[in-house]
Image (cartoon, rainbow, N blue to C red):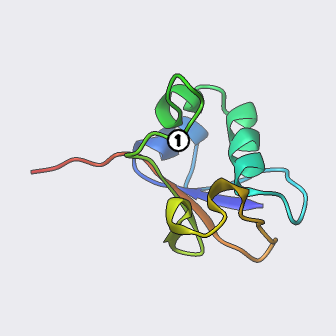
Amino acid sequence: MKVRFYATLRDIVGGKIVEIPVDHGSSAQEILDAIIAQFPVLKKELLDEDGRLYGHVHFFVNGRDVQFLTDDLETKIMNEDMISVFPAVGGG
């Protein structure tokens, strides 16, 4: 599955788009777990001490934040779905 990373996360993973090995029909949580397994340093960037996504991190499935989807992180992801991960972005 191709996952798009934005802002500071691109430097950590080494590019804009990274291939993450997951099975067709995996949940968003399983993809998140696979991302962290492939890039362990992302754990502190994406997850709080309880292992949940920080509120300021956005995990998008087809342009919609997973927290607003009916099944949240249990949403099933198909190969044709687009996954995007955004860290907190500040500015002024």
Percent from the top left, x then y, of residue 78? 80, 71
Residue at 51% of width from left, 72% of height from top?
Answer: 64
> Where does the N terminus fall, quadrant-wise?
bottom right
Q: Residue furthest top?
A: 49
Residue at 45% of width from left, 39% of height from top?
Answer: 54
Q: For the image shown, how many numbered marks are present on the structure?
A: 1
Percent from the top left, x then y, of residue 43? 58, 29
Amino acid under label 1?
Answer: Leu
Element on which disc 1 rests: loop
| Vertical relation: 82 (above or below) 19 | below
Residue at 52% of width from left, 74% of height from top?
Answer: 63
Percent from the top left, x then y, of residue 26? 83, 58
Percent from the top left, x then y, of residue 69? 58, 69
Q: Left or right: 12 with respect to 7? A: right
Q: Left or right: 42 with respect to 28? A: left
Badge 1 crowding class, 10 Å Cα cut-off, few under 14, some 14 to 19, many 20 or more, is many
The residue carrying mark 1 is 53
In depth, the one of 70 and 2 nearer the eye is: 70
Q: Residue furthest front?
A: 70
In depth, the one of 59 and 38 nearer the eye is: 59
Quarter of the image where one finds residue 61: bottom right
Q: Left or right: 51 with respect to 45? A: right
| Vertical relation: 21 (above or below) 62 | above
